[in-house]
Image: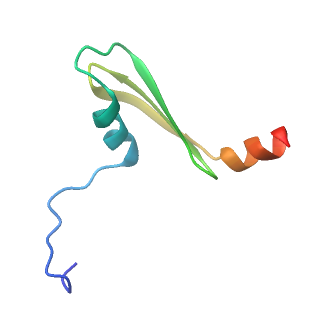
Amino acid sequence: MKMADLEIVASETELIAASRALLLPSSGPTIIVDMGASSTDLAISEKEQIVFSHSIPTAGEALTRVLS
């Protein structure tokens, strides 16, 4: 980032970004599932905060193999 003369002010994970984009202040307990090609990330949120997260090393490629 030094070469571009940029300063990192903040960064966040995909699950946190997804929860900020998807959840409303009035949302009850919610599960967010982010299924990629090789892993699936799960997050359980309550009152706009992630209270549990887990990554599973199985995802879209395995699902495609099973369905085809």
In which image quadrant can residue 26 be found?
top left
Number of disc labels: 0
> The N terminus lies in which quarter of the figure?
bottom left
Give residue 33's position: percent from left, percent from top.
Answer: 51, 33
Q: Is 51 drawn above or below residue 37 in the view shown? A: above
Q: Residue at x 14, y 70 (%)?
A: 7
Q: Residue furthest bottom?
A: 3
x then y, percent, for residue 59 = 66, 44
Q: Nearer the viewer, residue 46 or 66?
A: 66
Residue that extends furthest to the front in the rendered view of this protein: 68
Front residue (pair 4, 43): 4
Q: Is residue 28 above or below residue 11?
A: above
Query: Relative to residue 35, is residue 14 drawn left or right?
Result: left
Q: Height in image: 47 above or below 32?
A: above
- The structure residue drawn at horizontal position 25% and vertical position 55%, both measured from the top left corner, is 11
In this view, which residue lies farthest toward the right? Answer: 68
Residue 65, position in %: x, y? 82, 46
Residue 27 occupies which quadrant of the picture? Answer: top left
> Which part of the image, by quadrant, shows the C terminus?
top right
* Relative to 33, 15 lies left or right: left
